[in-house]
Image (tube, helix red, strand yellow):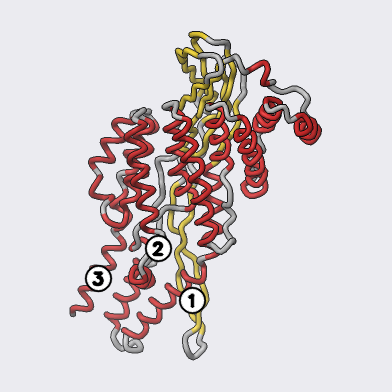
Amino acid sequence: MKKIILITALAAFFLGGCAAMSFYKKVDMQMGAGQFAEADKVIEESKDNYKGEHELLYYFDKGAILQMMGEYKESTKHLENAELKVESLYTKSATQHIGSFLTNDMSLPYEGEDFEQVMINIMKCLNFLYAGDASGAQVEARKVNNRLNLINDRYEGKSIYKEDAFARYLSAIAYELKGDYNDAYIDYKKSLAGYTDYASLYGTEIPQRVKLDILRTAEALKFYDDLKEYKEEFGIQSYPRHADTRDKGEVIFVVYDGMAPYKVSKQQNAAVKDKNGKPYLVTVAFPVFMPRGSVVNSVYVDGEAPAFEAENLTAIALKNLEHKNGLIYAKAVARAAAKFFASQALSDNGKNSTMSLLMNIYSYASEQADTRSWRTLPSRFIIARKYYQPGKRTINLTLDTATGRREIPFEIKLKAGSKKIIPVYAFN
């Protein structure tokens, strides 16, 4: 009787596990409406749902929402907590993994997808850039390298997410803010290499703008041999020359386009054999990202379209999780098989039909994929850059969306050689 009660309780626990995070529908609605303070209230009201194994998601969501609210210091504090949490989870205890082997990965503390861990430092880097702190932005950009190295070590070199082109590009901007064109030039080149990898991995375009930035910084450094070589390689003769832009101010818009994909649990059958070689089919669950699409078709700054896709998080999420699922397939099958054969053993070879039924319910209910993810990120980032003469002015940003055009005016004061980095949110 005690076994029956325990198994029934466990089955109910797993079947009800997804309901705890249902508040995200409210968060999505408020984000889509641009009501970021209201979204923050929903998160705070739902704080109990983040406790325990979901703690990292709280720091993720608070860090992102506070950034949208313009509370950059508070956002950074929560993102720092997320970073510390990831580091503490890097070496998990064997006990936790043994427990998840007989249940599912939802019983483990959520440590974030690989790209989500990197996004912690990218979001912190953006906070510093929005606040005009180039040094802080550089520190976070450098941390991306360390995180990527850890990820690559974990997968023993089999990870396809080896570089983040967006992080490199932001790092280059930070170096330019400090007048360090040499390091900016290096990072622009690394960013281009990253975008070239993105093109083959995720099917995204290599931004022309990055090539122009390489030419401009090469000229600023008087690397004329490099300049000639890259002009021939890129097939570009005209570019924003450093001599023409150094006394101007620059506005850099960072557009958060659409909402990040979310995970669902997908099940499939896999063949296993018992100790006597008899074949059986077991059900295996894997997480799959469901894209929510982009909102923005194009971006115009004072009538011009100098924008490019800087990071397609949806494409990265889908491809990297697919690759990761391939790497962990054997573990998932072994876990499903262990529960199946445990069910067989506890049913006394079919004599105890009640126990057999309950164990089957438990096996089905517990075979659920880990559907947690950082849902308050955008689907992608778009960057638009434009130079202006120093002084006060109104700059008009136009977002061409599926529902029409949105005109957003910005009152900006620019100094010679300065850069103003501005976030723009278009989640719906």
Q: Is residue 280 above or below residue 100?
A: below
Q: Residue at x 28, y 58 (%)?
A: 16
Q: Which residue is mark 2?
A: 91
Element under disc 3: helix
Q: CA distance from mark 1 to mark 2?
A: 33 Å
Q: Is residue 95 above or below residue 178?
A: below
The residue wearing badge 1 is 281
Say what amino acid the circle numbered 3 marks: Thr
Question: Which badge, 1 or 2, comes first in the chain's sequence?
Answer: 2
Find residue 175 and name its label: none
Q: Residue 273's x, y, as percent?
A: 50, 83
Q: Which residue is mark 3?
A: 8
Q: Residues within 10 Å of mark 3 (few under 14, many from 20)?
A: some
Q: How many marks?
A: 3
Comparing 334 with 54, the one in front is 54
Distance from the alpha carbon under mark 3 to that under mark 1 = 23 Å
Residue toward you, 200 or 275: 200
- C-beta proximity under 8 Å, tags 3 and 2: no
Question: Would residue 148 appear left or right of 237 to someone viewing this image?
Answer: left
Image position, residue 250 (x, y; %): 55, 19
Label 2: state its secondary structure: loop
